[in-house]
Amino acid sequence: MSDTILVVDDDLGIQKQLKWSLTDFNVVFADDRSSAIAQLRRFEPKVVTLDLGLPPDPANASEGLKTLEEILALAPNTKVIVVTGNNDKENALKAIDFGAYDFYQKPIDSDTIKLLINRALNLAKLEDENRILAKTRPAMGRIIGNSDAIQTVMRKAEKIAGTDISTLLLGESGTGKEVFARTIHEHSPRKDQPFVAINCASIPENLLESELFGYEKGAFTGANKTTVGKIETAQGGTLFLDEIGDMPIGLQAKMLRFLQERVIERVGGRNEIPVDIRVICATHRDIQTMVGEETFREDLFYRIGEIPINIPPLREREQDIVLLARTFLNQYREEFNAKAKSFSDGAIRAMLAHRWPGNIRELQNKLKSAVIMAEGTVIQADDLGLLEPSEDFESEILNLREVREQAESKAIRKAYQRADKNMSKTAELLGVTRPTLYSLIDKYHLEDLKTGV
């Protein structure tokens, strides 16, 4: 069934031109504000083209702007493309500020207007899908995403949430490792007990031991009272050790003993204190390489990583970028009482073209800044600090991505054959870790490599 497009224009010549050129759509017409609202209620179109010069005052844009406001008040998710005179850019920009999706200046070119409508329609459909996903989000509700990459990770997290098996979260900085750890905790039998997080990289080496294990009064200069550490604080719940790859080698031995025996001794103390907690660790480092370099204990690595989970970077989750951006937009708009409520088409294309080296954290920061600083209701690429890609550039990016993915898939298969189907040797030949190799195998659907076929 064809998508319905509402054309609001009192010029019969333009109505005929659009009906002739938009044959892929079910086009319905209105010639003033009241008929436009009636058609909107009847057909609920996702896209509307609106001439700002409507009766009873077709020489001015006031009636068209009032119609725009009524349309968006009644159906705020509708994509409205305003049509203006050749020298009326000021009112076109005012319409964008009111919430119009885009504008087009006469004379009408059939191919251009069709392109704008298709873009608006695709965006409207994507937003509809995102809203449905938001309402029907699976059990791991804190984690947002519908891409194959993140869904694979979510299913793995769901399976282990109900157990106490030690979990190692691997991924670049900013990918949301603590969010995953909290989500696993919230869906575990320990959910009503404390979740305690500590970043091993942010605490000086000489203080990390006492932060983790606590200390007795008089254990060192300044220890004026007995203090409970993070491990004891998490009693009954979950301890999240972020950036465990930065834990000093000397402290790793004491951590290993705790994980094996489930008892601790405070700094300066002699009494063994039993502790019942779940431990989830995370790092952005290549732990296996560190084990080979003897900067991380091999026995501790196997103890903390019974189940490793690779969290993909945002650049491998293209399908999730707009969904995440809209989630943050809604969050920050409410938090800062801001007027920004949507993205321009250029902003969306800019977000999809960006590589996101800082991952989700970078996206959050850009959205927070954009929501605060945006002048109108529509966030532009400039508000995000991103360059809007040209059509040619966008096409080149898609081609380069396809070529890169084909090359990586081919390289993995070639290395696998050269390594006599041994995964460790395959990873070594490719210069990646085993967890990264498995992540690439999942990404490129090379499941036959896992079975050794």
Image (cartoon, rainbow, N blue to C red):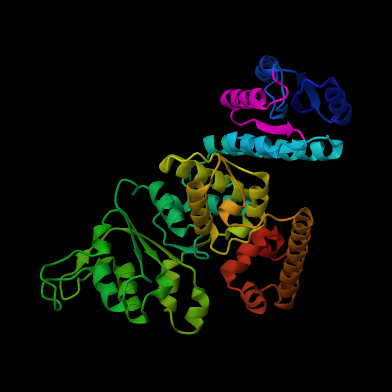
| Residue shown at 67% from the left, 25% from the top | 64
In the foreground, 447 or 268: 268
- Is residue 190 or residue 339 the one in the foreground? 339
Quadrant position of the N terminus in the picture: top right
Residue located 66% across and 63% down the image: 441
Say how many tags the image has.
Answer: 0
Residue 311 magenta: no
Q: Position of residue 253 (x, y in %)?
A: 33, 78
Q: Is 123 located above or below residue 48 in the figure?
A: below
**Is 67 positioned to the left or the right of 119 in the image?**
left
Q: Which residues are magenta?
A: 57-85
Seen from this angle, which residue lies furthest right?
A: 20
Query: In this rendering, would 24 be left or right of 235?
Result: right
243 left or right of 424?
Answer: left
> Residue 279, position in %: x, y?
36, 61
Q: Position of residue 87 (x, y in %)?
A: 75, 38
Q: Seen from this angle, which residue lies furthest bottom?
A: 293
Front position in the image: 76 or 134: 76
Residue 100 visible to the viewer? no
Q: Image point 81% across, 22% down: which residue?
A: 11
> Going 53% across and 35% down the picture, which residue do you hit?
135
Quadrant location, the C terminus: bottom right
Q: Can the viewer see residue 411 in this picture? A: yes
Q: Position of 420 compared to 272: left or right? A: right
* Res. 166 image quadrant: bottom left
